[in-house]
Image: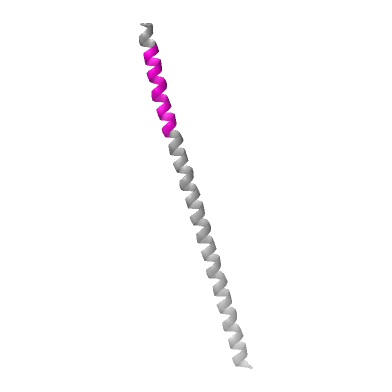
Amino acid sequence: MEARVWALLALSLLLGACGAAETGATAAAGAESAAQQAAQGRAAEDKVHQQIDAAYKQAEDQRRAAEKDGQ
């Protein structure tokens, strides 16, 4: 009877360890995904800033051209 208890305890520990390893792997994959999403977000933000800067420059160039034509 005692051997059966030890066998069940060992089996429970092994199965529990598998679940813990899977949880750790899932957490690591989630963290990697979050890091990739953050990097993509920063890249998108940089692109928007560049587009805004280009639009401001284009508007400034148009304003200067209009002022030059008006003189």
Residue located 61% across and 85% down the image: 64
Who is closer to the viewer here, 7 or 45?
Answer: 7
Q: Pick out the residue farthest to the top.
A: 1
How many numbered discs sit on the rendered protein? 0
Q: Is 14 a magenta residue?
A: yes
| Residue 22 picture quarter | top left
Question: Where residue 58 appears, x then y in whole percent?
Answer: 55, 78
| Residue 46 picture quarter | bottom right
Q: Which residues are magenta?
A: 6-22
Instruction: State whether residue 62 is above or below residue 35.
Output: below
Residue located 48% across and 52% down the image: 37
Residue located 40% across and 23% down the image: 14
Instruction: State whether residue 22 is above or below residue 39.
Output: above
Residue located 35% across and 10% down the image: 4
Question: Where residue 19 appears, x then y in whole percent?
Answer: 41, 29
Which of the image's four quarters has the C terminus?
bottom right
